[in-house]
Amino acid sequence: MNVSAGGLTDAAGRTHDVAPDARILSLVPSLTETLFALGLEEQIVGRTAFCVHPMPAVKRVKSVGGTKQVNWTKVEAARPTHAVLNIDENPKEMARELEARGILPVVTHPIEPVDNGPLIRLLGGVFDRTQAAEDMAAAFEAALAAFSAAPAPPRQRVLYLIWKDPWMTVSRDTYIARLLALGGWQTVAHDPATRYPKVQLTDDLMDRTDRVLFSSEPFPFKESHLDAFRQNHPRHAAKALAVDGEMLSWYGARARSALDYLRDLVTEVPV
């Protein structure tokens, strides 16, 4: 994602003109929050059911379905000119169908914290909120520089769980894993063939893991799931930790506060 002489280029390589009067369909929860933060709330005409921030303002925008499948009748009724998408969260077929219906996809794909600056500037540039985007991006980049300059926390090996039945985790080329790595938490069970591998909670894996992180999303892990893990793996019971999935996986407007959350997390959790 970059700004070039010819315009603003998204993660799919498409160059966009500035669209100050765009009617925006946002199909990524973290980007819906970011669009609101950029002052675009009056131009957002549709969202997913998972776009739940900022509350209560987001309730004003009608849901058109989920991140993987939408109700096309509702999409057409919203009359969007642009749709904001993410390569990990939305299928390619959705982008193609949007374009076939005359709705211009704006595709994003941040894979590490440093990508937040270009991501925010892309959205601000396309939708004519350049100054607001620059302020937000610059504030994040200053916070990231300060975080990176601080003394490195002790390194730990962590298993970050995002799903159950089957158990699933994140590989090291994902945004989540690279954010955790900033705090010295190296994800285990990396699989170069897939970004979200299935895993078995074996003793061998647990022996190579210092912390087992149960994310609050996309699977809504509760304390009961941690209790079940402790009962099934008593030798590793102390490793279970509930974490805020929104803080650790949402990019854009939330990225700056995510750094504070990560700093507190790695500082407060004993080695």
Image (cartoon, grey):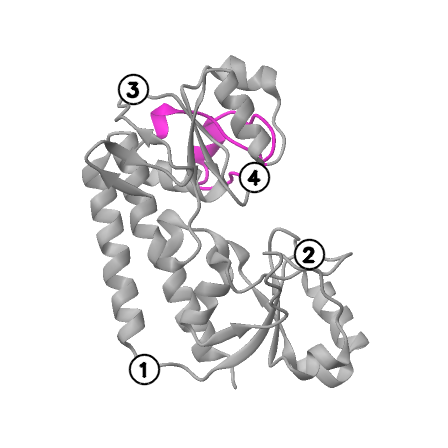
Percent across and percent down for residue 118 are 30, 47
Question: Mark on residue 163?
Answer: 2
**In front of the other: label 3 or label 4?**
3
Q: Counting residues from the N terminus, which is met first, the one under dot 2 or under dot 1?
A: 1
Residue 66 inside the magenta-drawn segment:
yes
For marks 3 and 1, the one nearer the N-term is 3
Q: Which residue in the structure is indicated by mark 1?
A: 151
Tell me which secondary structure the magenta stretch mostly adopts: loop
Disc 3 to disc 4, C-alpha distance: 25 Å
The crowding category of the residue bearing disc 4, from other C-alpha atoms within 10 Å (few below 14, some 14 to 19, many at least 20), is some
Mark closer to the observer (2, 4)? 2
**Is 128 situated above or below 202?**
above
Question: CB of mark 2 within 8 Å of CB of mark 1?
Answer: no
Segment tinted magenta in the rendering: 41-67
Residue type (three-letter) at the residue carrying disc 3: Asp
Alpha-carbon span between mark 3 and mark 2: 39 Å
The residue tagged 3 is 21
Residue carrying label 4:
50
